[in-house]
Amino acid sequence: MISRGIASLAKGMEALINFEDVTAHNIANVTTAGFKRTNITFQNILNSKVEAKNALGIKTEAGSLSIGPRVDRTYIDFSQGGLMESNNKLDVAFQGDGFFKVRYQDIPDNAPYDERNYYYQRTGNFALTDDNFLVNKDGDYIMDVQNRRIRITRDPDSQDKNEMNRLEVEKDLIIAENGQISLNNPNFSANLQKIQICDFEDKTKISGVGEAKYLPIYGQNPGVYTKQDGTFSLQQGKIEMSNANTIKEMLNSINISRGYESMSTILKTES
């Protein structure tokens, strides 16, 4: 019985270490824009049957005994993060579902389509390159509904990089809730490209790859929204913050530490 108790304690302590790793990752990203916290679930393992002998020496089943928990799975919590005003017309936040589709900057326009050249993110703190393409903080390109790089200029078809073709973002740029980009100036106005908004049928089949970037797993392909359908809206001039809550994560960490210390004390007593 002592060895079985030690094995159960060891499994429990291992599960708590895994829980603490997940919690520490969440705490480290409470200020990371667009970050989605990770959750963890556990299950009992090796449920052993307990037998007892009656007065005649016949064994009967008396019940079962858990040998301890193990990590069942970790998953990403895609609940809404709070929106913060940024007063930057190139910042765009999601309200509701959806992801931006992003292409790595070193992939040429004429490359054959390959899903591995893209990733997905909710973080919308964007900027313009010298040649007026919309990029994220890493310099990777934001895609439009036709899977093209988005170019924001007075004349997107012109390759001219002079100041006459560059617009005043704070005055002229409008990004609608459905992702439509337009220019609104007393001297000129135009509809430009439309931001591609993607989502996944099953968000449990999305893998985080760091820095609030995500990839589909198990061969799942993201669907593409081509019109406003009530499940999302884009908010210009705002940033979606992390959905990890400092107080809740710290309470988790404290409870984990207390549980680990209690198990450690019992383990020392048993051994």
Image: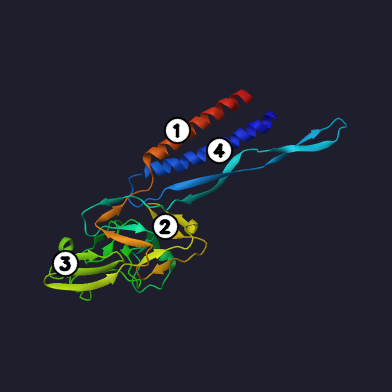
Asked if 66 appears above or below 161 in the picture, the reply is above
> Spatial distance from mark 2 to mark 1, Cα to Cα?
29 Å
Q: Are marks 1 and 3 in contact (CB under 8 Å)?
A: no
Farthest front residue in view: 230
**Residue 16, relative to residue 137: is it above or below?**
above
Q: Which residue is mark 2?
A: 214
Disc 1 designates what residue?
254
Q: CA distance from mark 3 to mark 4?
A: 57 Å
**What's the mark number on residue 167?**
3
Question: Is residue 271 among what the camera can see?
Answer: no
- Kind of residue indicated by mark 1: Ile
Mark 4 residue crowding within 10 angstroms, few (<14) / some (14–19) / many (20+): some
Identified at 34% across, 64% down, the residue is 106
Depth check: give the residue in front, 247 or 4.
247
Q: Which residue is mark 4?
A: 14
> Which residue is located at x 11 percent, y 72 percent?
187
Which image quadrant for residue 45?
Answer: top right
What secondary structure is marked by label 1? helix
Q: Among all residues in the image, which is located at the extreme bottom? A: 157
Looking at the image, tell me whether mark 2 or mark 4 is earlier in sequence order.
Answer: 4
SS of the residue at dot 3? loop
Residue type marked 3: Leu
Give how far across and how far down residue 25 sits, in percent.
Answer: 42, 43
